[in-house]
Image (tube, helix red, strand yellow):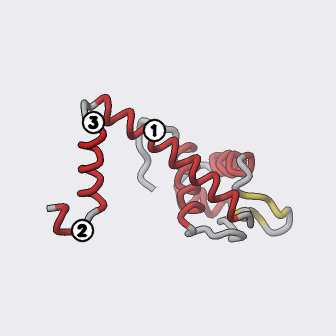
Amino acid sequence: MDFKSNETIYSQITEYLKKQIFSGSFACGTRLPAIRDLAVQCRVNPNTIVRVYAALSEEKLIYTDSTNGKFVTADAAYILQKKREFLREKSAAFAKEMREAGLDGGEVTEMLRKVFGSEEERR
């Protein structure tokens, strides 16, 4: 992972794992990497991953099976609910940034249409 200097490493890893869960890369019931393995992969102290997993557990996105490790919740509806909340927060922050940059809704819509449109439209 390439960490941004303006955010804590803990919050960046937490967000990364949420996105992996929300996108289905870590599907319902999937076993997550062991704390030490993820710490090595992210090049962070294992205590950081313990904190990340605790935050995800507190949000009920993951749970611990004491003998088998950490797993993504099996509740797909709950994951969808949390995904929508996450995207609403991101959308609100994006909208605020665009307003502060002086763009109106039409300009933002056009920009997004180009970003998400076909390859030809992006040129």
Nearer the observer, disc 3 or disc 1? 3
Q: Residues within 10 Å of mark 3 (few under 14, many from 20)?
A: few
Q: Are marks 3 and 2 in contact (CB under 8 Å)?
A: no
Q: Residue 37: percent from the left, percent from the top? A: 63, 64
Q: Residue 11: percent from the left, percent from the top? A: 55, 43
Determine the residue positioned at 29% across, 48% down. 109
Real-space CA distance between mark 3 and mark 2, rounded to the nearest whole angstrom: 23 Å
Counting labels gives 3
Q: Amino acid type of disc 3?
A: Asp
Q: Which mark is residue 118?
A: 2
Which residue occupies the extreme right position in the image? Answer: 66
Q: Is residue 115 left or right of residue 17?
A: left
In depth, the one of 90 and 51 nearer the eye is: 90
- Which residue is tagged 3? 104
- Which residue is tagged 1? 92
Q: 7 above or below 25?
A: above
| Quadrant position of the C terminus in the picture | bottom left
Q: Are marks 3 and 1 in contact (CB under 8 Å)?
A: no
Question: Which of disc 1 and disc 2 is earlier in sequence?
Answer: 1
Q: Which mark is residue 35?
A: none
Question: Which of disc 1 and disc 3 is earlier in sequence?
Answer: 1
Real-space CA distance between mark 2 and mark 1, rounded to the nearest whole angstrom: 25 Å
Determine the residue positioned at 52% across, 39% down. 8
Q: Amino acid type of disc 1?
A: Ala
Q: Is residue 9 left or right of residue 2?
A: right
Q: Residue 112: percent from the left, percent from the top? A: 29, 52
In depth, the one of 65 and 103 nearer the eye is: 103
Q: Residue 95: percent from the left, percent from the top? A: 38, 38
